[in-house]
Amino acid sequence: MMLYLPKHCRTNNERLYALKDKHKGGRCVIVGNGPSLAIRDLDRLKDEITVASNRIFLAFSETEWRPTYFTMCDVVVARENKDAIKALPLFKVFAGSVRKYYYDDPHAVLVNPPRLEDDRNARADVEGVLRLPGDRPPPEPGHRVWMKRLCLAPGTGGDAPVNTLAEDTRWPAGWNLLRGARAGHSVINLGLKIAYWMGIREVYVIGCDHKFQVPDTETGEIVYNNKVIVSKGEINHFHPDYRKPGEKWTLPRLDLIARDFAYARCVYEADGRIIRNASRFSALDVWEKVDFDTVFP
């Protein structure tokens, strides 16, 4: 399923605005790149709205499926794969952190970088949520997360001018893509924000193992407070060529990723939406787990 933006969307903000509530009430699959992702499963998703990322294109020779949206937030991945990713004829929605590599990509829409005050609020909100065990309800109304409106007020919906929507502060901090949003510590988290922005009601995540083996070497380089390491060979993703020996990548912080995911659950559930983990294997227990074969027979 390929989608293209209307020709009249000339500026990046207009392109972002065109995506607002594009799939309102629909369901979406966010495709992670963990070892549990089975390429054979992707053909079952050909009629689904899907968001995939990074080196998912390594699967394309083995499946007719292509993602509806392609996203990325890791600066090292963006830098090391710039030419290959620019060549992909996919609808791309990228984090502002990779802007300097893809500002001239005609297929790319760039999420605006977070404003300082919003970024501070988002960090405070996420730290307040920490982590939600599966049997614990969301925080009570009145918690900081709920003091922000989780949807636009009447009169500021789909027909609102771009600039009006960009200044709307009633969204959860960091979830209004026009105003500015941080991807967080995982590209899946960015996918959740994109899906929320497009009005998706049900999200199913696959290929999210939430488990990494890191027998690699630190380089001493720091990118967005994350250590950059050098791979000794691929053991953490769905394809044996995903990361070659000697390639740089950023060290994942599973504790911070889980915290971002818990906050995402709060945002979705407060607005009557759901996130489900349909990965064939996953160590993540923040979201309710469901069986892939049952949801996508």
Image: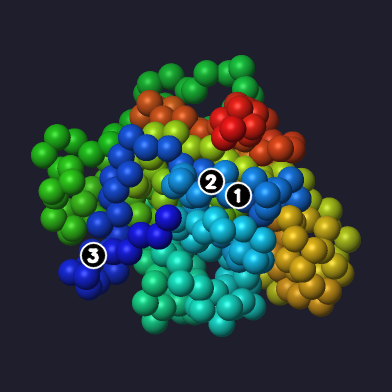
Callout 3: 10 Å neighbours few (<14), some, many (20+)? Answer: few
Residue drawn at point x = 23 percent, y = 48 percent: 168
Relative side of 130 to 150, left or right: right
Residue drawn at point x = 47 percent, y = 23 percent: 139
Give residue 221's position: percent from left, percent from top: 71, 74
Q: Which mark is residue 42?
A: 1
Q: Check contact, mark 1 vs mark 2: CB within 8 A.
A: yes
The residue beneath circle 2 is: 45
Give the foreground label among 1 and 3. 1
Give the amino acid at mark 3. Answer: Pro
Residue drawn at point x = 42 percent, y = 51 percent: 194
Image quadrant in which the N terminus is located: bottom left
Q: Check contact, mark 1 vs mark 3: CB within 8 A.
A: no
The residue beneath circle 3 is: 6
> Which quarter of the picture shows residue 116?
bottom left
Give the amino acid at mark 1. Answer: Leu
Q: Earlier in the sequence, mark 3 or mark 2?
A: 3
CA–CA distance between discs 1 and 3? 28 Å
